[in-house]
Amino acid sequence: MDCMVNPEISLSEWGHELVDSLGGRRYPLSATFELTERCNFNCVHCFINQPANSQEVRERELSLSEIKDILDQMANAGVISLLLSGGEPLLRPDFLDIYLHAKRLGMLVTVFTNGTLLTPRILDVFTEYPPQLIEITLYGSTQETFEKVTRLPKSFETAMRGVRMVLERGLPLNLKTMVLTVNRHELEALKSFAENLGIKFRYDAVLWPRLDGQKGPENYRLTPQEVIDLEKKDVERQEEWQKQDGIFSDNIRLLRSENVWICGGGFHSFHVDAYGRMSICQMTRHPAYDLRQGNLRDGWAFLGEIREEKRTLETPCRSCSVGVMCTQCPGWSQLVYGDHETPVDYICEIGHLRADYLSKLYYNED
């Protein structure tokens, strides 16, 4: 008898097939768990970081038992993919307990880290129980630039050591960066560094405002035209944009004209912060459901109610034809204006510039 062979598919393909199998139903497939807002870096652009040694912040954070309970609830609800982030998640002395608990629940775990707190003990556990991915952020290819961003002496050296340690263990690793006015001149060098190591690299050039309303990150962000100029040089990113379904269709415009929420937040994914507040995504922190006072199943139902919110303001988003080229969302509106609908000019301009450029590529226009 011939044996049956199941063809191997990538995790991305499997994920798409899994979503397709849901037939458009809401289901909590993935979650981001922000274990702490504290970080050992003090990056000039960061939207969230709190001092690494802040006792006041530490006392407000979820305990290990609370985190394990929430992870149990996630698994029971059907969460498959879990991102552990911060701040710097490795600052928590109980990080490995958290990580191993998630792994024992069968979750596919990704860890976002700056790489400086990796130890042989942590890497031993990662080697025995491998994460789906480790993603390390590098803020420059030279010590001067890197530490101009992190404002922490010797952070370049320790981050690079972390990269080497992960590679020596053969663990899955990606690199990324935030492109700022003070490090954009080293973006190509970072790309080459990752390419020479044979690992994936990504960048983001759009900085979020700080969650606490403090000013600062906007002083380091690129102009909309500078963001698009970077994308013009990035063939891979252009190809990804052009793969988007209905890139220039009216479907997104029609969705935007009625619905506040058109993304996957609160539909197939959600976010839990360091204090147990469950929200639609990492950027949209309000409204939130307090898991310390309730349970995750009720929290998921709460997010479903939020997603039913309809537009009440007359804004250009209702009739905009830019479609998927625009990343305008309730999170941006909330952080800048305190509501869910008012468009942010900075994001709007990037969307229009991107759409104009890609439409010329798409239709082979001059």
Image: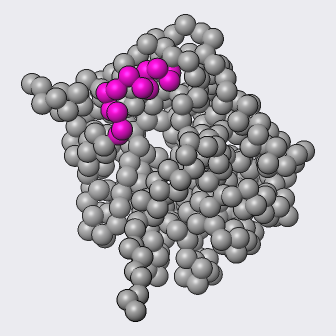
Residue shown at the point (46%, 61%) measured from the top left: 14
Q: In this orientation, does residue 97 appear?
A: yes
Which of the pair 231/116 is nearer the observer?
231
Q: Position of residue 284 (x, y in %)?
A: 64, 34
| Quadrant of the image containing the C terminus | top left
Q: What stretch is highlighted in magenta?
A: 244-256
Residue 247 counted in the magenta span: yes
Q: In this orientation, does residue 164 appear?
A: no
Residue shown at the point (67%, 23%) measured from the top left: 309
The colour scheme used to paint the residues is one colour
Q: Is residue 206 above or below residue 75?
A: above
Residue shown at the point (53%, 53%) measured from the top left: 21
Is 68 placed left or right of 6 in the picture?
right
Is 354 placed left or right of 76 in the picture?
left
Which of the pair 204/39 is nearer the observer?
204
Residue 153 counted in the magenta span: no
Residue shown at the point (24%, 31%) measured from the top left: 358
Q: Where is residue 224 in the image (x, y as percent from the top left)?
A: 35, 26
